[in-house]
Amino acid sequence: MIDSQDTFVSQEKFDEMIKELENLKTVRRTEIAKSLEYARSLGDLSENAEYQEARDLQAATEERIKKLEDLVKNTKILTDGKKKNEVSFNSVVTIKKDGSSDLHEYTIVGSEEADMRVHKLSHVSPLGAAIMGKKKGDTFTFDTPSGKQTYTIEKVA
């Protein structure tokens, strides 16, 4: 059973997170340290905008590093264990809203990879959660800000 609190990502996304983490820990930290050193050399730190900016950047970077470390430690990598004709992770699903002829295609992904601009839908979003486990031909309803919406699964790949 999948816990909606779990974080799932593809191997590709996991590798991206590792790469970003390594870059932040090595390259970015070094750049920030140099910026801080330069800003300190300018004198009075209480009215030094460059110093404050570098400190803010350092704090944001350290926060991102901590988040990535937690994600990498607690993330589950999705394997291609798709069930035939049933919506699961990495499924490409085509749906149609009742009363419309427009088709919408989404890939079901973990929340860290969700990006509606490229039709990647999180399994924990209202629509994603409603789709999970459904099969071609199934009709489902879910709540939206404008009320209940009903869709039909047209295709699962």
Image (cartoon, grey):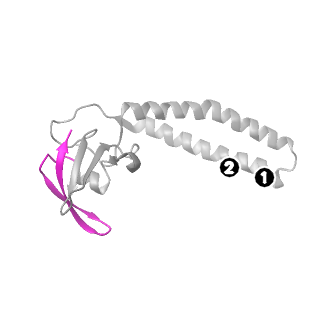
Q: CA distance from mark 2 to mark 1?
A: 10 Å
Q: Nearer the viewer, residue 97 or 67?
A: 97
Q: Residue at x 15, y 36 (%)?
A: 84
In the displayed orientation, state which residue is furthest to the right: 43
Lateral position of residue 34 relative to residue 127, left or right: right
Bounds of the magenta segment: 132-157
In the image, residue 51 lies at what x, y percent?
Answer: 77, 47
User: For the residue marked with disc 1, what is the amino acid?
Assistant: Ala
Q: Residue at x 44, y 35 (%)?
A: 72
Q: Secondary structure at mark 1?
A: helix
Lateral position of residue 121 relative to residue 156, left or right: right
| Residue 84 sits inside the magenta stretch | no
Label 2: which residue? 56
In the image, residue 115 lies at what x, y percent?
Answer: 40, 47
Quadrant of the snapshot with the N terminus: top left
Q: Earlier in the sequence, mark 2 or mark 1?
A: 1
The rendered magenta stretch, by its main secondary structure, is classed as strand
In the image, residue 116 lies at what x, y percent?
Answer: 38, 50
Label 1: which residue? 49
